[in-house]
Image: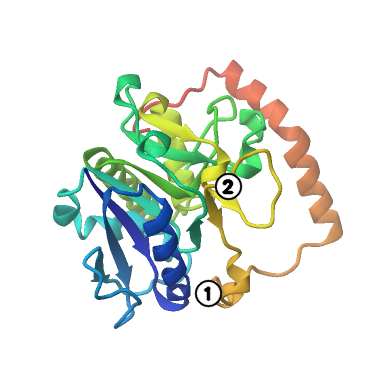
Amino acid sequence: MKVGILYICTGAYTVFWPDFFQSFQQNFLPGVEKTYYVFTDAERIDHDDDPAVRRIYQKAYDWPYSTLKRFAVFLQAEEELRSCDYLYFANANLLCTAQITPADVLPRPEKGEDLVVACHLGYWHKKPYFLPYDRNPRSRACMPYNAGQVYVAGGFNGGTAQAFLWLCHTLNDRTEADLADGVIARWHDESQLNRLVAEQPRRFRVLDPGYCMPEDVEQPFAPHLLVRQKSKWINVGAIKHNEGPRRSFVRRKWEAACENYLPYLLCARDTLLGKKVKSGQ
C-alpha cells in the first residue's frame, strides 16, 4: 500500500514543515509506505534529501486564492499522484500527536466509502440549519437550510487516489465556475467540500473532530491531528490582508440575533418549498 500526503507550504508557511514531517513519519500510518508531495516556492526545505519527500514548485497565491486554488494545485501532479493507492491532504499547521492506523483513517469499502473527511470541532453538536454552509444561491457551494447533516473541516481529507482526484476535479471545476461568475464561496474550499459531502454522504467516512483538533482546546475527543495556532508562528493578518473595518456594536448584535433565530424560519421556508441538495447543482 502506498499513501501520498499532499502538503502546501508557500511563503511563510514553510515554518510548519519540519515538525509536520517528523510527526507524520512517526505517527501517521506507521509501517506504511508514504510519499510527501510538498508544493512550495522554497528553493530548499528540511528533509529534501529524504526519499519519501517529493518537492514540487508552486508559486504563492494571494489570499483567498491560496486556499481556493488548492484543488488546481494538486491536479498539476495528477499523473504522478495516480501511482498512489490513497491520497490525503493535510493543512500545513497540523501535527500528528497520536498513532493513526489504517483502520482509523482509511475509507471502508464494505460501507461504500471511498473518501474521508473530519467533522469540524465547532459544529459537531449543532443542528443542520445552524451550520455555516454557504447560503448564497449564486454559488455552486450553496446549501438550503433544510439540508445537510454534518459540517466538515477543510484541513484534513483524503481517500482512494481515484476518488480523491475525482473530488479535486469536481471541486476545482465548481470553484472556477464560481470565480467566472464573480462569486467566492463563504469559506472557500471548505464550503465547496461540504456541499459535496451533502450530495453524496454515503461515499464519505466522517471522522470525529479529534482528527482536526485546535490546540489549547479541551473537548471530549482524543486529539490525533492537532491544529497549531498559526498566529504563534506567522503574521496571519499580513497574509490575509486583515479583515476590513471593525463592526459596530449594533451590527454585531443584529448579526448575532440573525444567526441564533433566523435559521429556524429559513429552514421552515426551504422545507415548505421542497428544496433539496442534488448532485452537481
Please give the residue where the numbered disc 1 appears in the rendered image.
239
Q: Secondary structure at mark 1?
A: helix
Residue 139 visible to the viewer: no
Which quarter of the figure is the N terminus placed in?
top left
What amino acid is at disc 2? Pro
What amino acid is at disc 1? Ile
Q: Nearer the viewer, residue 279 or 1?
A: 1
| Figure disc tally | 2
Q: CA distance from mark 2 to mark 1?
A: 28 Å
What residue is shown at x 43% (from left), y 60% (from top)? 67
What residue is shown at x 77% (from left), y 62% (from top)? 247
Residue 210 visible to the viewer: yes
Q: Which mark is residue 20?
A: none
**Marked residue nearer the N-terminal end (2 or 1):** 2
In this rendering, is residue 160 above or below 266?
Answer: below
**Left or right: where 102 falls relative to 265:** left
Residue 9: quarter of image:
bottom left
Q: Secondary structure at mark 2?
A: loop
**Left or right: where 37 falls relative to 131:** left
**Left or right: where 47 falls relative to 18:** left
* Image location (x, y in percent) of residue 225: 51, 51
* Image location (x, y in percent) of residue 251: 80, 55
**Left or right: where 157 falls relative to 148:** left
User: What crowding class fits label 1: few (fewer than 14 Cα within 10 Å), some (14-19), or many (20 or more)?
Assistant: some
Residue 280: quarter of image:
top left
Please give the residue where the numbered disc 2 appears in the rendered image.
223
Q: Nearer the viewer, residue 190 or 262?
A: 190
Q: Nearer the viewer, residue 53 or 70?
A: 53
* Image location (x, y in percent) of residue 108: 34, 27
In this rendering, is residue 228 above or below 253?
Answer: below
Q: Residue furthest bottom?
A: 43
